[in-house]
Image: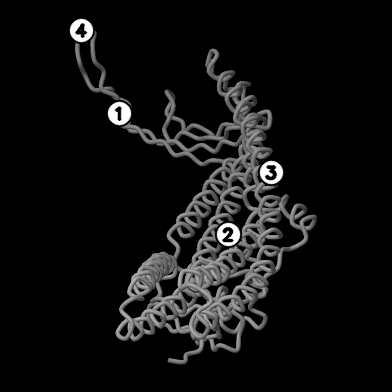
Amino acid sequence: MAATPAQAGALQLSPASIRMEQDAETIFVTSDRQPLRFIAQAVQAALNRSPDIEQAAASQRAAQQELDNARWNRWPKLQAQAGSGAYRLGGQSQRRDTSKPNLGLSVSTTVFDWGRTGHDIDSREHTMFAAGENLRHNQERTALLTTVALIQMGKHRQLSAVADAYAARMSELVNMLSDIVAVDRGRASELVQARAKLLQALTERDTVAAQSIEWEIKLRQLTGAAAAEVPLQEHWPLSPPPIADTLSWMAGSPQVMQAVQEEQAARAQAHAQRAAAWPQLNWVVGKQYENDAYGQRTPWQTQLTLTYTLQGGSSLAAAAAAVERSAAAAAHKERVLLDLEIQVRTAHAKAVASLARVADYVQMGAQTDQVRRMYFEQWHHLGRRSLLEVLTAESEHHHALTSSVHSRFEAYLAIIDMHAGAGRLLSWIASLESDGSVMQARGKGRLPH
């Protein structure tokens, strides 16, 4: 019974059409586009529906309103007063006072408060900027989660193709041995070995399929779309950015900028707390709309008032607390910079090492493919190899293919991690969409251009 090795053992990958449905909209990309453009579309869908982004945007709007409230403290305040006739209690009798209901109007403005209002405005302004950076951080985080899910889906679909090919090869050997054992019962042990390998291949295929489904669910959770047909493409055009450039970009990342703004807000708040401990000088203009004891109408009055609240040590404690918050924010900023530098350097080293391993595994795959073909010929036609050697050769070839896929996509994930660590993932994803025709953003989740 002459037979040649099945071509199913080799990895055959080709681009596929993509179709994604979200709400009532359809996003469609043909296979002539690179897989990276599909990432841009999926990230845009995730940005449009992320509850974390909506929450961060609401926090930013609240911070803006608080800033407006602080700015209004610089304007004069108009105050109206109204009172009824007094009812006297105590003494020999209780009787209603003969005074009439009174009305009053006053306008007051701060003349000098040691900079408390200005520092409070500065603190609220930096808090608003920090909220904006937090919004950017949530957008970057959503983009990272979506991109990782897409890359993992692409990885598991390639692994699924490899596992299908390996299971098909083992099934072919089992069928072949079944025909041989029907004639030669003495080779039944070989059939048992082949069936064991087939069961291992089927188990691996089912495991990969289950993991692929998990990532599809995660992607649907992020984008709200049906399971997307991620391009089944062996090579994605991804390469690590220069490490020096990436490290220089870190200073502008949302995490670092948020920490900087929080530090400045805490410092301004400390100045405001110190100023609040001193007297405040106000200018007041007012009028009471009632007659005096001689029956004459009271005139407009203007005066300077000095207010000072004796707070004991509470004001000093509040100022000291604000100073400590400023120091904590400064330490947090340094920690964020250090963590991001470690993240970027680790991701760069991992990307370089993984891409180097890919080249080794590709060569290994070519060599093991020749070995398994030769072993099969020598076993099937010449009887010079045992079935165990043939199965081992098939297993080694399968291991080389799966290792190549694992290493390649580990490199892709590390490259994405570098962009995320530099705070430029959204900018990089936006550059994938050169014409911007597919970008239909809704709300604050639009990709930057």
Three-letter amino acid code at disc 2?
Answer: Glu
Observer-nearest residue: 150 or 426? 150
Three-letter amino acid code at disc 3?
Answer: Leu
Residue reaching furthest to the right: 244
Q: Which quarter of the rendered picture does the C terminus lie within? A: bottom right
Three-letter amino acid code at disc 1?
Answer: Gly
Quarter of the image for residue 119 reads top right
How many marks are shown on the rendered structure? Answer: 4
Q: On the image, numbered disc 4 is attached to which residue?
A: 92
Q: Is 128 rendered above or below residue 395?
A: above
Q: On the image, numbered disc 3 is attached to which residue?
A: 337
The first of marks 2 and 4 along the sequence is 4
Q: On the image, numbered disc 1 is attached to which residue?
A: 85
Asked if labels 1 and 3 touch by Cβ distance under 8 angstroms, the answer is: no
- Can residue 61 be seen at all in this image of the molecule? yes
Please rate how many residues cluster around mark 2, counting C-alpha atoms within 10 Å: few if below 14, some from 14 to 19, many from 20: many
Q: On the image, numbered disc 2 is attached to which residue?
A: 140
